[in-house]
Amino acid sequence: MSGQFSDEPMIDVYIFETTQNIEQLEQIILASEKESNFGEAAINEIFRLMHTIKGSSAMMLFNNIATVAHAVEDLFFFLRESKPAQVDCAMLSDLVLSGIDFTKVELAKVKNGDTPDGEATQLMQEIRDFLQLLKQTNFPAAPPPDRTPAPVNQQYYISSDRRTPHLAQNLFKAVIFFEDDCEMENIRAYSIVHNLKEFTSDLHYVPVDIIDNDASVAVIRENGFTILLKTDSDYAEIHKLLNNTAFLKDFELIELADEQEFVTFQTANNLNPMELELKLHEQLAEKVVLNSVPKAPTELKSGVAQSIISVNVDKLDKLMDLVGELVIAEAMVTQNPDLTGLELDNFHKAARQLRKISGELQDMVMSIRMVPLATTFQKMHRILRDMSKRLGKEVTLEIVGEQTEVDKNIIEHISDPLMHLVRNSIDHGIESNQQRLAAGKTAPATITLEATNAGGDVLILVKDNGKGLDQAKILQRAEQHGLLNKPAAEMSDREIYNLIFLPGFSTQEQVTEFSGRGVGMDVVVKNIEAVGGCVLVDSTPGEGTKVTLKIPLTLAIIDGMNIRVGNSRYTLPTTSIKESFRPKPNDIITDPNGNEVIMVRGQCFPVLRLHDLYQVATAMTDFTEGILIMVEQDTSSICLYADELLGQQQVVVKTLPNYIKSLKKITGLSGCTLLGDGSISLILDVGGLLEHVTHQVRS
Amino acid sequence: MTKVLVVDDSAFMRMAIKNILADKDYEIFEAEDGALAVEKFIECAPDIITMDITMPQYNGIDALKQIRTIDGNAKVVMISAMGQEMMVKQALVHGATAFIVKPFKHEQVLQTLAKVAST
């Protein structure tokens, strides 16, 4: 990592801001492409965003990013200034998107601590060629204005004071050198001329073309900037003024004895005394004003605009941890075993107040961490565009409920699965245009992304109106790969559809560029389950497929039911508990393999003894002594056998310590937590337990 | 303590300038667009303003003009980029005191601000 700003916060801000700018750019471009027109506002915005990316990247010394951004900026400068009539919008979008993709790749390198070293020579050439083509098709005869529009031909400046007749006595010659790499030497020279205007009645300088010729920069670097002036001010005054110039490397100021040298200099440099350009600077001002079309100063915004600050996520994580500790500490105080049996009215009143405030604090911290799904959803536009273009399928994307909020940590986990689902939909779910028309559907297919809140969960739906899933094909495929664990005839529709999420399943004979990357839909499930969510599929043949991602709002604090097995404590998420009951002895059925099942209201559920699973010593092994808890996930249920229920409590989810995780993988645990009495409780992962039971039954 | 108002729509650029001026004798204020710059100028009365040129809606030149109408002696240093020569000229005509070209170096910013502060 190089650069003068290589310290962490600068890079963080750079990555954050550039990523944001790129996302914004992408949206503008996709919107413009849809309308086949780049409007003035869009062009200005793209220009500004590219300008910002260029500036920041150059500061970080990421020159390859800066160069590409500069090239695109130049392109949009041309579009903005020359307003060419014929622009190939599709081509323009492709180019800018390529530029964005390049920047994305380089940004990823920066994120990983690598040096962004990508080569963009070809892309740069394409951009340049495109600009050239634009110029040729739109302005074949006259070359369009260059980056620097030709300004008024100002060679020297004569103060309006000249009109008041007075004699300028002193003649000076100054040669000025600017510091190396200060850039824009010609403008710096102009700045000096501009500053001298109050002191002089007659001023000449070389090179003369500092305004309209950028090549004058080289001359100034080589020979310095030479000024001759007549003034009333004395040597000291002019010296001080020049000395104040920024980026001054060196300068020489000589007082000339007579006008002779003045005249020689004028003739030598072909300077004619001019009478008419008294108001030059005003003309220049006018000219430039026309160029930039400044808006009338709009009314000032009130001070509320600054009310948003950005905070490092690490700090929020830390804050969340602290609130978690507070919740535990509160439970430790209010449920302290020392308090049992005491009459403590005032204490309980105060404790209630404490509980209320810590609850509000917790809600507040949670809400801070919530971010809308909008950005994640918007990213799908790009995938849709690229894929539908290449596969020749017309697809529109509908987004519903993008303002739905999810915890920041969770959002990071669902972006990839969503991308995969959308890709899959376009590739496999949606028919070709001809097939759609033949089936009596509209040619543009629709993919809908929808987010809704459902209790402690957020549901994200990916729907398409394609051909739907082919049950026969799925079953056939699953059989081939030995993925069926019960006869096909016994499987519900949903169970059949869920087969597509099994590792090693893919019905597509031909792996296409997009869908087949060696990863199947099982990756989607794995990612979603990693954040405690689940995936459901529904499909109607001929009408389309709907995939539902059910994800928790937050990972950090859950409502839990604490249970006891022997001396160990376990916590179950209350959302997955259906009921708990003490069974009658004759409800329990044992199959020939020794698997226990229980009949509840005519339905059989497998029973899992937690003390067996985790080898906990307990006296209560008879079903009539302990309690059965029915838990459910994805429509399948099992009953867990425990000694007793301890009570409901909000628990803070901590991951299992690494030394335990690395030692062995423990089935059915998603983490651990601290209880009010200071004991540790293991949080049970219902999905994992279900899987364990299914495996057991199968084997 | 010299008060500096840093105007830039890019948080990265504001941070870059802030970092350079950190631990020096500067008190820093920030604004993220031209309109806010004018507001902050009135509110904080900074000694120097560093002004980005390309900003959404209300750009640096507009803000410069507005600030110079409020206070004809306001010292504004334009932060420009290569290719913005015409904009810089225009800014100078409208009373900008100096300018810095991106990407800038630490010394360039410090030197310019020191010079501007001393005038």
Image: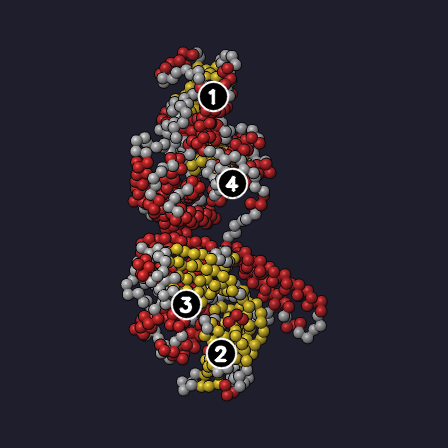
User: What is the total number of numbered labels drawn onto the structure image?
Assistant: 4
Tag in front: 3 or 4: 3
On the image, the x and y values in percent for residue A4 come to 43, 43
The mark that comes first in sequence, 2 or 3, is 3
- Give, as a three-letter code, the residue at label 2: Cys
The residue identified by callout 4 is: B33
The residue identified by callout 2 is: A639
CB under 8 Å between discs 1 and 2: no
Q: How is the image coloured?
A: secondary structure
Tag in front: 2 or 3: 3
- Give, as a three-letter code, the residue at label 3: Val
On the image, the x and y values in percent for residue A20 come to 45, 49
Secondary element at image label 1: helix
Circle 2 crowding by C-alpha within 10 Å: few under 14, some 14–19, many from 20? many
Q: CA distance from mark 2 to mark 3?
A: 25 Å
Specify the quadrant of the image occupied by residue A514. bottom left
The residue identified by callout 1 is: A279
Q: Is residue A376 above or below residue A597?
A: above
- Give, as a three-letter code, the residue at label 4: Asp
Circle 4 crowding by C-alpha within 10 Å: few under 14, some 14–19, many from 20? many
Chain on which label 2 sits: A
The residue identified by callout 3 is: A537
Secondary element at image label 4: loop
CB under 8 Å between discs 2 and 3: no
**Which residue ends up furthest to the front in the rendered image?**
A440
Residue at 46% x, 69% y is A660
The mark that comes first in sequence, 1 or 2, is 1
Tag in front: 1 or 4: 1
